Image (cartoon, rainbow, N blue to C red):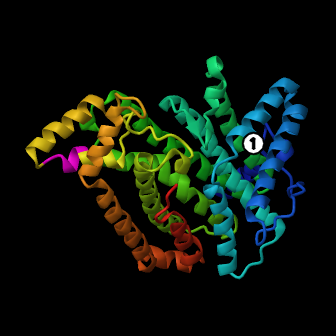
Amino acid sequence: MAAWMKLSNKKRVSSSLPATAQYRQKSPSISYPTYDYDKDPKGSFMKICDMLIDELMNDLSQNYSLPKRERDWLERMLQYNVKGGKMNRGLMVVQAGVAILESQGKPRDNTTLCQLAVLGWAIEWLQAWLLIADDIMDSSVTRRSQPCWYKTLKENWYIAINDAVTIESLVYKVIKQHFAHDPSLCFGILDLMTETTLQTELGQLCDTLCDVLTLKDLTPDRWLYIVTYKTAFYSFYLSVALAMLLVGNVSDPKAYDAARKILLEMGIYFQAQDDYLDCYATPEQLGKIGTDISDKKCGWLFTKAYHELLTDDVNLITKGKSLLDTHYGNCEVGSNEELKIKKLYTSLGLPKLYEEYEQASYDKIMSLKNSESGKILEKAGIPWDGVFGNFLQKVYKRSK
């Protein structure tokens, strides 16, 4: 009976794609562009995005009978929202994949590079739809040095909600189109993507509910949960895990656990950076207008000030907490009240404390190289310097 069930289940996995059987082929019938990783890594990466958009537009026309007006809308929406960022998360997939291939002594062929880039764009598109939704919830004004997508729609801003969830659906369409020929691999990719999406949305929930909580509820522990789930999983762990899955042939759960431990630490540090830059960097540096104070964000600066620094000096406590209680989350961007809160942060020595935190975070992450996690990854053929050390250097002391 056990053997029969095993055979039955295998047959079910290999043959059952009731909605999109056209993607279930022995090998992908896709003509990828030439990927010049050494001389034009970003340009080659961008070509894959253009290819994916073209594929989807053709698919929506042929298999969904989507009218031209709606196809044009989706194409314009995708061009506006999925491009224009630094593409760090997506490029990390390709860079991690190349480092793993080199570490394991494997060649890097054009198809593999392009498939790594497809997974990279899956993350970039995941981020795009999350940012569209996030900007609506935060009433943000700019994103990537241009008006937020919902802002461009003016009184029809609500259409952006459907646009966001449409991008999410298209991510899974892309994954099936390029990886359904290998059911085991495709299932692993979908497992990572769906789990990371849920983790990110749980972090987003905890972030959004801050709107209805008191400032006393915006604690350092809440900040840690938010940044771990909202940022660290999808911004750092997902990129490396997808590369490990596609080219590393890593099946040991301990290796993924080890990578996750290191990359979550990196993601937490990255978000603390983001919180600091939201306050102290210029809009030109950020590519957006910092709104954490006006939006009542449970940020690194606020939680440090409110729960850890405003505890000793009675006069400072009275004035500082009164200022925050009255105006944090209840002021306009660029207002005198916002400037007073920024001056309070500076008077509390937060720039110096952040500098110390940044160095301590860097040292902590680097110390993991020789930890048990580092040894597990080395055994699995995942190189520290080419993956973790390389990515840490990209974010260490960044200014934008």
| Percent x, y of residue 267 | 47, 57
Whether 146 is drawn above or below 177: the answer is: above
- State how many labels appear: 1
| Percent x, y of residue 394 | 55, 66
Residue at 77 percent of width and 50 percent of height: 49
Quadrant hosting residue 208:
top left
Among all residues in the image, which is located at the extreme bottom?
Answer: 105
Q: Which portion, as a residue range, is magenta?
A: 306-311
Q: Is residue 371 magenta-colored?
A: no
Q: Is residue 83 visible?
A: yes
Quadrant hosting residue 321:
top left
Q: Is residue 380 visible?
A: no
Mark 1 residue type: Lys
Among all residues in the image, which is located at the extreme top?
Answer: 155
Residue at 36 percent of width and 50 percent of height: 224
Dominant secondary structure, magenta = helix
Q: Is residue 114 left or right of residue 274?
A: right
- Identify the residue position indicated by label 1 in the image: 173
| Percent x, y of residue 323 | 23, 34
Residue at 86 percent of width and 63 percent of height: 34
Q: Is residue 63 left or right of residue 183?
A: right
Q: Residues within 10 Å of mark 1 (few under 14, many from 20)?
A: some
Q: Is residue 238 left or right of residue 231?
A: right
Whether 20 is drawn above or below 181: the answer is: above
Closer to the camera in the image, 179 or 359: 359
Whether 342 is drawn above or below 370: the answer is: above
Where disc 1 sits, the SS reads helix
Closer to the camera in the image, 292 or 27: 292
Closer to the camera in the image, 290 or 28: 290
Q: Is residue 308 magenta-colored?
A: yes
Among all residues in the image, which is located at the extreme front?
Answer: 336
| Percent x, y of residue 85 | 64, 49
